[in-house]
Image: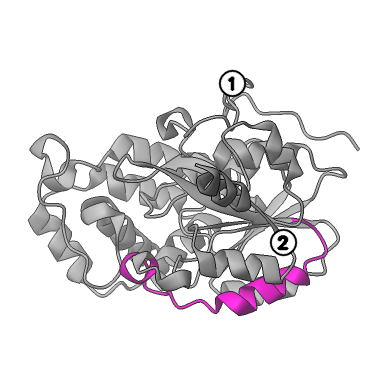
Amino acid sequence: MRPPKQTTLFPELAAEEQVTKPVNVASVPQRSPFRYPGGKTWFVPTFREWIKNKYPRPRILVEPFAGGAIISLTALFENHIQTVVMAELDEEIAAVWQSVVNGDAEWLAKQILDFDLTKENVITEISHTANSTKQKAFQTILKNRTFHGGIIADGSGFLKYGENGKGIRSRWYPRTLARRLRDLEFVAKRIDFRWADGLKVIQEFASALDAVFFIDPPYTAGGKKAGRRLYRHYDVDHETLFSLCETIYGDFLITYDNTEEVRTMARRHGFQMRLIPMTNTHHAKIEELVIGKGLSWMDAYPTVHEPEAEYISSKIK
């Protein structure tokens, strides 16, 4: 069966953009309504290289820790995949994706366009107990777009200064957000969303012959505190996650912070690892760990290398 044609409404990046340097995220088409901490926009070109070379083409992409879901949305809009299974345990984030798949994206778009964004109005809106999933979704988008770093976890607060002193309006682009939500209506029927534990969803689809996985768990392994600060549901059993990945029939990619504990778990379970450059939220260039069954395809890129290679070269110096 021939693969579906690429839609012209949502063009891909230029073919020559490869995994050769930290990705300029502004060059990646933004699909998600979220400004999501730990988002994987920078990983999109690498994901494209991985998925387009899969044969036979997988039918399902499972993203068990969906968050802003940029990888799943990219896969759908660019027709790399027929269906995505997105799981998210956070009730507020889940409400947004539930509203999209339930046909309420247009309602959300209109609420955003009509909302008079002031700090007082935001406080008034989010202080109300939501009487529907779509209202909870609207409140979530408001918080995500006006809270510091897009963080909606407990303890977060409003942007103080933002870009050019704009404060809470710094990340409020009503027309852009409305367009993204309306665009999601094109792919909503191809999204199987689960308000669920990601580990259980991995277990459910592990034996599927036509499924691949993109797994981006909260980074709490190796003593990392980022996940605890950024996410409400940060407590993931990483050893169980790696054990479940061993049972996956198809292929998978995992992204993690580069810590010794994670590298040790990956080696113990027989997985391959590569380090890939990225630019973090503070515009510092760092390397993130990619884990999978077979990652030799990444060796074509000069800036990608195995963790062991970094250790050996540092000893030689």
x, y (%) of residue 227?
39, 67
Left or right, 196 with respect to 149, comes to: right
Task: Assign the N terminus to one quadrant of the image.
Answer: top right
Q: Is residue 87 visible?
A: no
- Image point 63% across, 42% down: which residue? 47
What residue did someone put label 1 on?
14
Residue type at mark 1 is Ala
The quarter of the displayed image where residue 10 is located: top right
- Image point 26% across, 55% down: which residue? 142
- Image point 61% across, 77% down: which residue? 239
For residue 271, the mark is 2
Badge 1: few (under 14), some or many (20 or more) residues near its Cα, within 10 Å? Answer: few
Of helix, strand and loop, which one carries label 1?
loop
x, y (%) of residue 153?
30, 69
Q: What whole-number distance in Å separates the C-alpha atoms at marks 1 and 2?
A: 31 Å
Residue range in magenta is: 227-251
In the rendered view, tell whether residue 315 sits above or below residue 299.
below
| Magenta-span inclusion, residue 226 | no
x, y (%) of residue 119?
10, 54
- Image point 40% across, 31% down: which residue? 26
> How many circles with numbers are drawn on the protein?
2
| Of marks 1 and 2, the one in the foreground | 2
In the rendered view, tell whether residue 249 sits above or below residue 295.
below
